[in-house]
Image (cartoon, rainbow, N blue to C red):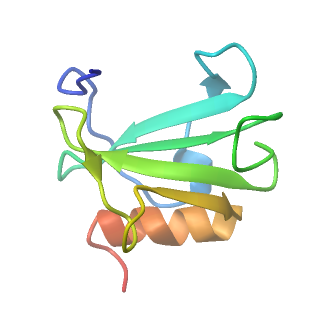
């Protein structure tokens, strides 16, 4: 299991704060962003196998420092096919900045 305790927490204000790199599977992109409340957000997208194209739509999951999923909706740990604006709103909710 991946742990995230070594990631540095950074402020989050907008989607543009996410730093995307090549996904570890070799295709697509991933941004890992640790919030000040120690929630780690993973935003991914790309070709087949992802729930977002990595350009205009994305999938998102959130984890605690120990790598355990944080439920983002009833019965689901991953949100799929989110726009950039929806990703931003979901992260702001997790950071305690939104409704």
The residue depicted at 81 percent of the width and 46 percent of the height is: 55
How many numbered markers are drawn?
0
Quarter of the image for residue 48 reads: top right
Image location (x, y in percent) of residue 51 = 69, 49
Quarter of the image for residue 96 reads: bottom left
Farthest residue to the front: give it: 75
The residue depicted at 21 percent of the width and 43 percent of the height is: 64
Does residue 10 appear to the left or right of 15 in the view shown? Answer: left
Quadrant containing the N terminus in the rendered view: top left
Does residue 92 appear to the left or right of 68 in the view shown? Answer: right
Quarter of the image for residue 63 reads: top left
Q: Nearer the viewer, residue 40 or 36?
A: 40
Image location (x, y in percent) of residue 29 = 68, 30
Q: Is residue 64 above or below residue 77?
A: above
Quadrant containing the C terminus in the rendered view: bottom left
The residue depicted at 67 percent of the width and 51 percent of the height is: 58
The residue depicted at 72 percent of the width and 35 percent of the height is: 49
Image location (x, y in percent) of residue 70 = 28, 54
Q: Is residue 42 above or below residue 59?
A: above
Image location (x, y in percent) of residue 38 = 19, 45
């Amino acid at each position: 299991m991946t742990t995230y305790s070594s990631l540095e927490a950074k402020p989050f204000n907008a989607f543009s704060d996410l730093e995307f790199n090549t996904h570890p599977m070799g295709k697509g992109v991933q941004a890992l962003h640790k919030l000040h409340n120690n929630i780690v957000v993973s935003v991914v997208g790309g070709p087949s196998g992802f729930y977002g194209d990595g350009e205009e739509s994305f999938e998102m999951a959130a984890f605690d420092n120990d790598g355990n999923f944080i439920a983002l909706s009833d019965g689901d740990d991953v949100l799929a096919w989110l726009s950039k604006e929806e990703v931003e709103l979901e992260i702001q909710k997790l950071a305690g900045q939104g409704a």
